[in-house]
C-alpha cells in the first residue's frame, strides 16, 4: 500500500498528467486546462472545530495533490483550486472524505481572509461584517476534488453522500444535502474514452483495466502503438500498481511495454494471474517472485521516495540486501 501510494502521488504531481485528468473529467478530454496554469499548493488542511466541552481539537488532513489554477476569464484572472486523491484500494467512505477535504480548504480560505482583514484593519463597520470578520463583497475560490482509483476491481463504493444513507421519505431526502465525488476508475472507461487522455495516464489506466486478462492485455499492448513507446515513469507506475513482473531496468527514457511483457523469462505474476511463455515449476516460480522483489526494490531506490527500511517492508528483502542493491546501481 505504501509503495503504491507513494508512486501514484509522485506520478500525479506532474502538471501535465494532473491537467490531463481534470480535462478528462470536466471537459470530456478537451485540453482546456493547461499545465502552465497550475501552481503547487500546500496539501495540509487544518481546521479548529469547537467540541461539546467548549475546547477545540485540531483536525488535520493531508491531500495527495493540490494545485491552484489561474486563467483569464472576461479579461479578469479566474482562480480554481483542484485536488486529486489517489486510491489504490476502494474506500467506502469516500464521499465523506472528499466533503471534509473540500470543507477544510474552504474554511482555510475564510480564516485567511479574516486574518488579512484584521491585519489591514479594513473590515467594513457594519455590525454583521464586523462580527463575521468577512466583508459582504469577499468571495471564496471554488474547490474541486477528483478521485483517481488505480485498482483493477470494479469501484463498488458509494459515489455520493446519499448512497451512504438510508432515507426512506422523499421530503426528508430532498432536504438532506448530498455530496457527489468525481471519480476516474479504469473499469468504467471504454476503449474509445481512453483516447480522451493525452499523457501516459492513458496507458496506466488502460493497462490496469486489462491486467487480469492475460490474453486481452497482450492483445491491447500489441495493437495499441502507444504501449510501444511508454515513458519510464509511466512504466514504473504500471509495474508497481499492478504488481507486474516487468523488467524495466533497461529502459532509458522510454520502453516498449508489449516487448517487456513478452520477454518475461518465467511466470509474470499480476495479482495471482500468470503471464508468460511457459508454466514454470514451483522452484522457478519462487525464483521469479524473488526477481520481482529485486526489480521493485530497484524502482523504489531510484525514485528516492522511501527509506531502505520502508522498502524492506514493501518488498520482503532485508535492509542489507537493499543496501547492497543500492550500491550496485
Image (cartoon, rainbow, N blue to C red):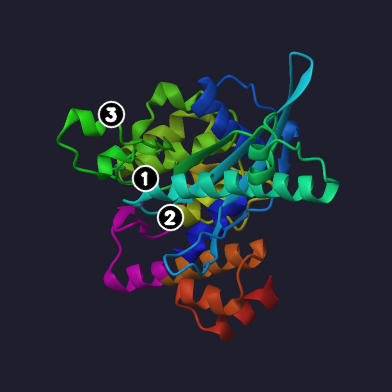
Residue 208 sits above or below residue 265 on the image: above
Residue depicted at 35% across the width and 32% down the height: 188
Instruction: Report if residue 211 lies within the magenta region.
Output: no
List x then y, in percent, for residue 30.
Answer: 58, 19
* Residue on which the image places disc 2: 244
Q: What are the residue bounds of the magenta stretch?
A: 262-289
* Residue on which the image places disc 1: 211
Q: Residues within 10 Å of mark 2 (few under 14, many from 20)?
A: many
Residue lying farthest to the top in this orientation: 74
Asked which quadrant contains residue 19, the reply is top right
* Residue on which the image places disc 3: 174
List x then y, in percent, for residue 260.
Answer: 50, 48
Residue 13 appears in the picture as rendered? no
Instruction: Report if residue 285 lies within the magenta region.
Output: yes
Asked which quadrant contains residue 53, the reply is bottom left
Residue 209 sits above or below residue 115 on the image: above
Seen from the viewer's position, the closer of residues 68 and 172 is 172
First reached walking from the N terminus: tag 2 or tag 1: 1
Judged by depth in the image, the label closer to the viewer, 3 or 2, is 3
Residue 256 appears in the picture as rendered? yes
Residue depicted at 81% across the width and 40% down the height: 122
What is the spatial separation of the Cα atoms under label 2 and label 1, in whole angstroms?
Answer: 9 Å
Q: Is residue 268 left or right of residue 196?
A: left
Amino acid at each position: 500500500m505504501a509503495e503504491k501510494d507513494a508512486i501514484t502521488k509522485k506520478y500525479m504531481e506532474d502538471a501535465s498528467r494532473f491537467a490531463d485528468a481534470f480535462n478528462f473529467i470536466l471537459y470530456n478530454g478537451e485540453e482546456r486546462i493547461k499545465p502552465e496554469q497550475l501552481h503547487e499548493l500546500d496539501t495540509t488542511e487544518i481546521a479548529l472545530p469547537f467540541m461539546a466541552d467548549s475546547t477545540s481539537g485540531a483536525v488535520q488532513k493531508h491531500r495527495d495533490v493540490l494545485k491552484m489554477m489561474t486563467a483569464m476569464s472576461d479579461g479578469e484572472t479566474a482562480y480554481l483550486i483542484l485536488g486529486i486523491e489517489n486510491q489504490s484500494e476502494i474506500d467506502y467512505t469516500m464521499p465523506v472524505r472528499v466533503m471534509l477535504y473540500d470543507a477544510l480548504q474552504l474554511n482555510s480560505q475564510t480564516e485567511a481572509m479574516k486574518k488579512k482583514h484584521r491585519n489591514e484593519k479594513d473590515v467594513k463597520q457594519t455590525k454583521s461584517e464586523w462580527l463575521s470578520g468577512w466583508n459582504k463583497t469577499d468571495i471564496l475560490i471554488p474547490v474541486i476534488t477528483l478521485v483517481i482509483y488505480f485498482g483493477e476491481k470494479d469501484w463498488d463504493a458509494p459515489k455520493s453522500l446519499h448512497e451512504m444513507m438510508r432515507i426512506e421519505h422523499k421530503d426528508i431526502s430532498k432536504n438532506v444535502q448530498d455530496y457527489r465525488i468525481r471519480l476516474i476508475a479504469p473499469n468504467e472507461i471504454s476503449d474509445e474514452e481512453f483516447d480522451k487522455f493525452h499523457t501516459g495516464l492513458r496507458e496506466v489506466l488502460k493497462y490496469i483495466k486489462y491486467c487480469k486478462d492475460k490474453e486481452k492485455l497482450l492483445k491491447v499492448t500489441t495493437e495499441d502503438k502507444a504501449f510501444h513507446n511508454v515513458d519510464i515513469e509511466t512504466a514504473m507506475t504500471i509495474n508497481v500498481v499492478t504488481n507486474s513482473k516487468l523488467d524495466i531496468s533497461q529502459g532509458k527514457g522510454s520502453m516498449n511495454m508489449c516487448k517487456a511483457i513478452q520477454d518475461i523469462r518465467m511466470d509474470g505474476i499480476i495479482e495471482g494471474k500468470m503471464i508468460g511463455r511457459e508454466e514454470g515449476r514451483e522452484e522457478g516460480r519462487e525464483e521469479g517472485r524473488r526477481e520481482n522483489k529485486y526489480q521493485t526494490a530497484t524502482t523504489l531506490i531510484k525514485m528516492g521516495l522511501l527509506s531502505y527500511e520502508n522498502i524492506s517492508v514493501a518488498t520482503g528483502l532485508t535492509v542489507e540486501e537493499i543496501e547492497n542493491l543500492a550500491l550496485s546501481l
